[in-house]
C-alpha cells in the first residue's frame, strides 16, 4: 500500500501509531508498568498516554520523551514532526 502515492501521502500526514509508539507500550506491558506512574514521573496527563496507546492521537514530542525515558530508539523521520515545523 505504501507504493500508492496517494495512500503514502495520507499515511504520512495522518499516521497515529508507529513502530516507536508500539515499542513504548510493548515495553510497559512487558515490564508490567502502568501509565499512571509514568505520566506522573514525566509530568504529563494520563489521558495523553491513553490516547497515544489507543492510537487516537500522536504527540511526536511525547513519543520522543517516552523513548528517551525508556531507553528506546528515538523516532527518526517522523512525518508528524515534519508537519509541526511547517
Image (spheres, helix red, strand yellow):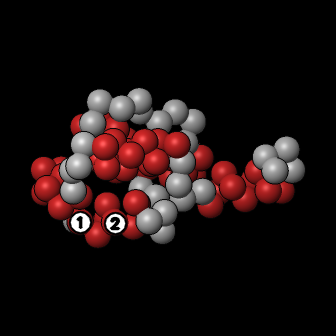
Apparent side of residue 10 relative to residue 83 in the rendered image (left or right): right
Q: How many marks?
A: 2
> What's the mark number on residue 67?
none
Image coordinates for residue 57, horizontal then vertical, percent:
46, 65
Residue 39 visible in the displayed image: no
Q: Which residue is mark 2?
A: 50
Residue at left offset 27%, top offset 36%: 70
| x and y percentages locating residue 6 in the rendered image | 83, 56
Q: Is residue 19 left or right of residue 67?
A: right
1 and 2 marks in contact (CB < 8 Å): yes
* Other residues around mark 2 within 10 Å, as few (<14) / some (14–19) / many (≥20): some
The answer to whether residue 42 shows anywhere in this view is yes
Between 79 and 28, which is closer to the camera in this rendering? 28
Classify 1 as above or below 16.
above
Residue 36 vertical placement versus 86 (above, below): below
Q: Residue 31: where, in percent of width, then height?
A: 24, 43
Which residue position is annotated with label 1? 46
Q: Is residue 51 left or right of residue 76?
A: left
- x, y percent for residue 85: 51, 47
- Residue 78, picture quadrant: top right
Residue at 22% from the left image edge and 65% from the top image edge: 45
Say which residue appears at 31% left-offset and 49% top-offset.
29
Amino acid at each position: 500500500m505504501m507504493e500508492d502515492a496517494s495512500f503514502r501521502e495520507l499515511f504520512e500526514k495522518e499516521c497515529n501509531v508507529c513502530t516507536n509508539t508500539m515499542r513504548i507500550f510493548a515495553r510497559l506491558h512487558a515490564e508490567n508498568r502502568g501509565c499512571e506512574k509514568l505520566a506522573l514521573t514525566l509530568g504529563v496527563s494520563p489521558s495523553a498516554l491513553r490516547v497515544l496507546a489507543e492510537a487516537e492521537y500522536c504527540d511526536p514530542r511525547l513519543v520522543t520523551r517516552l523513548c528517551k525515558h525508556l531507553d528506546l530508539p528515538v523516532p527518526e523521520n517522523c512525518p508528524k514532526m515534519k508537519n509541526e515545523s511547517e
